[in-house]
Each structure stands twice: as C-alpha cells, then as structure tokens.
Image (tube, rainbow, N blue to C red):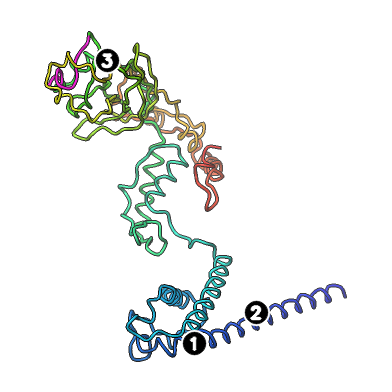
Amino acid sequence: MPIVRKFNAALSALAMTLAAQTARAEDSAALFNANVKPLISGHCTDCHGEDVQKAGLRLDTLPADLHDDAVMANWVKVLDKLAAGEMPPKKRQRPPQNEINAATQWLSRELRAASLDRQQKRGRVVLRRLNITEYENTLRDLLGTQVQVKDLLPEDNSAAGFDNVSAVLDLSATHLLRFQDAAERAVLSAVPTHPPVQFSNARSGREMTENGPNFRQTLSRSCKLQGDALVIYSKLPRYGLCSSGPVPIDGRYHVQLSACAVGEGLRSVPAAFMTVQNGPEQPVTFDCRDIPVGKPSVIEVDVDLKRGQQFVLNYLSNWDIRIFKKPIDEYTGPGLMVEWIKVQGPIDPFPSPSYRVLFGDVPLKARSVLAAEARGARLPVISDKRTADQWASDPLVPDSANPRQDADRLIRAFLPRVPPAGQPAGAAAFR
C-alpha cells in the first residue's frame, strides 16, 4: 500500500539520520580523547584535578558533552586560557605546541558547532522581560504619549555594566504589581483631563528683563537693551534667561522668535533652543541653530512643554564679556540680538492620537455631567472659560453607553498594533 511504503521510507530516513548523528558523536568523543584528554591529563590536573580545583574548576572529570550549558561554559573558559597562553601558568612546564594546537582546534570547532546548534534550537537571545527603560519606551511607542513610568518600577540589576542581560532581569511579585501600576498610569496619560485651553504669550527683549526679577543683575554685564531688543554677549545664567512665559498646561506649542547675529566680521552665531521648569533646575537643550547676521528674521519651531515650563533661547558661547573691562556699549564682538519671542498653543489635535488608539470614538464628558446623568439629575453648566485648575477637580472621562461591548471592541482593535517579538513597537503602533 502506498501509505505503508511512505511510512517505511520515513522510518528508514529517520533511522539513517539517527545513525549518522550517533556516528558523529562517537567520532567527536574519539577526537576529544585523542586531542584534548592528553593535554588535560598531563598538564592541568595538578591545579584542576581531584585534590585541587582552582577557580572552582575540575577538568579531569569534565565531560565532552557541549550540549550541556554548564559544561560548555567551562570549556569556553579553557579555550580562552589556552589561546591566551595563560594555561598552564607560565611558571609551569609548557606542553608541546602541537598538543596545544590540537586541543584548541578541537575545542574551537566543537564549541562553534554546539553554539550554532543551540541558536538554531533556542534562538540567539534568551527570552527575557523588558528592562524599565525598554518598558517605558514601549509604552510610549504603543500609546503615543511621553508618559514617565520608570519611577514606579524597581531598579534593574546589571551584569558587566548592561541592564538588558536576561540572567539578572528577575521577575518577582513586586515587579508584576509595579508593572500594572505603570500600565495604569500610561493609559490614564492618554485621557485628556480638559478640552484645549488656548494660550498665547509674546515678550519683547525688554519685557523679558522686566519679568525676570533677577534679570537686571546681568544687564550691562553680559547683555544690554537696544531699544526693545535684548542683545546677548555671553551665555545667560539660570537666574536671568531669555524666555517665554510659562505655559498653563502640557502640550505641543508653536514658538516664533525674531533674532539675528550682531558683531563685526560674522556670518552667524550659535544659539540653543531650551526648556526650563520653574525651580532651580538648569535649562535642557533640545536643539541648536546658527542665527545669521543681518536684519532680524523670524524663526519658528514646535516644542513639547509641560505645565509651568518656558521656552528659552540662549547664546552658546564660553566667552565671558566681563573680561572686556570696558563699557558694554563699546564692545563690537559677536552677540545675539533677540527682538521678541511668542508662544502659542497647544496645537495638538483633540482628542489626541493616543486617546484614539485606546478609546477610539468613545466621547468625553466632565465627570460631574456623567454623575448627574446617572442620577437623572439636572446637568451642570460647564463654562467655556474654565481654567486648567478648575478642570482638575472635575476632569473629562470617557463616556461609553455600552462599556462591556466597547471594551471588547477596543481591545480587539488595539491588539494588532502590538508587534511580534523582536519588532520595535513604534513600527506598528500607529498603522
């Protein structure tokens, strides 16, 4: 019967394969006994034998089974020491070079074959959890938010300076609870607490010096006023910055500024675009530009700002004009003139793409409105002039008429965005 013949043929092929593997294993064992065993028996057992096991390594009974991870790791150490000339130690009698060559050639060949076989069967990298940086980046890629969760998670262990080594990335009950807390924060970060609260702020160079209570300490020292423009000759300190006003809510803002380079024989001067938070922290640079000489020109940039942050423009120079020792009006060296800075926003769409990813078309309502609807009470009137602080006590929340059905639908829509193992989340998150 055809099926019987096919079955017999398959068994014959399997038997031949097993026979070939057995023969190869016997050949490998014979070569081990001929090429490696004599070197170990003659030159290594004094330090790594029955009585003494330096570095916890015993070689006289170490088998040649390189498919055992622990055995393979020990033979890798032996090969490394032999290749480096560190084994046997220099104070010991050196074995003939042909014995060393025979042993290292066998070990190199067989270790390579065992490593390749292990990679083909298990994969190149051992399955592990994400470290806290990878987890935060994955959440950001999947949800499209800049949520920060590392402060919620236990600190990762490291090996040889790396924190992505599977052997030290343990997973405890504490990790599971903290990862759930981090996921909850990430989901909540995608839900806006209020509608867009539009903000617009424009400051001339003169107004910047008037809004900064300590700014006048730098006037006539590292900068000066020229009409309503501010001319900067040295990098401004933290207590007196060329900046916009603080923004009232988190979001992406559109920044415009009018500036130019001043000084003799110049083409441009370097300037830093920065952000700064109220408090003692130093500004953080996110971009650098060359500002051309000539008439002031308008430069535009979009930047993510958190509540209370300001946009900062600073002159990148290590030169301290106080070395000049003359009135600042007599200085003709390089500088940066800033006429004005204007910030408008947020310019993000509402609701944000991250909300759409998780909640689709589920509408948003004030929490007080939902509570009134649930009680059948009169709906509260929500003023168009509500501030961000007022919204904080009565935030927007998703309003689903069919929570169970919507949850099932939204989860099914979200899961395909999660990429297969090994593929970055950002490649699939916003398809």
Give the residues drawn in magenta, as a range. 216-226
The kind of residue on which mark 3 rests is Arg
Q: Quadrant of residue 10?
A: bottom right
Q: CA distance from mark 1 to mark 2?
A: 22 Å
Which residue is under mark 1?
37
Quarter of the image with the C terminus is top right
* Among the two numbered marks 1 and 2 on one chain, the one whose residue lies closer to the N terminus: 2
Quarter of the image with the N terminus is bottom right
The kind of residue on which mark 1 rests is Lys
Q: Nearer the viewer, residue 38 or 400?
A: 38
Q: Pick out the residue farthest to the top.
A: 227
Q: Residue at x 44, y 86 (%)?
A: 40
Q: CA distance from mark 1 to mark 3?
A: 82 Å
Q: Vertically, is 97 above or below 412?
A: below
In the rendered structure, find residue 21 and report the number of the disc placed on it: 2
Badge 1 element = helix
The kind of residue on which mark 2 rests is Gln
Task: Evaluate if marks 1 and 3 touch, with contact meaning CB atoms under 8 Å apart.
Answer: no
Q: Vertically, is 329 above or below 302?
A: above
In the rendered structure, find residue 203 and report the number of the disc placed on it: 3
Task: Evaluate if marks 3 and 2 touch, with contact meaning CB atoms under 8 Å apart.
Answer: no
Q: Residue at x 14, y 17 (%)?
A: 220
**Where does residue 298 sit, x and y in percent of width and height?**
37, 15
Q: Vertically, is 106 above or below 118?
A: below
Q: Residue at x 18, y 21 (%)?
A: 212
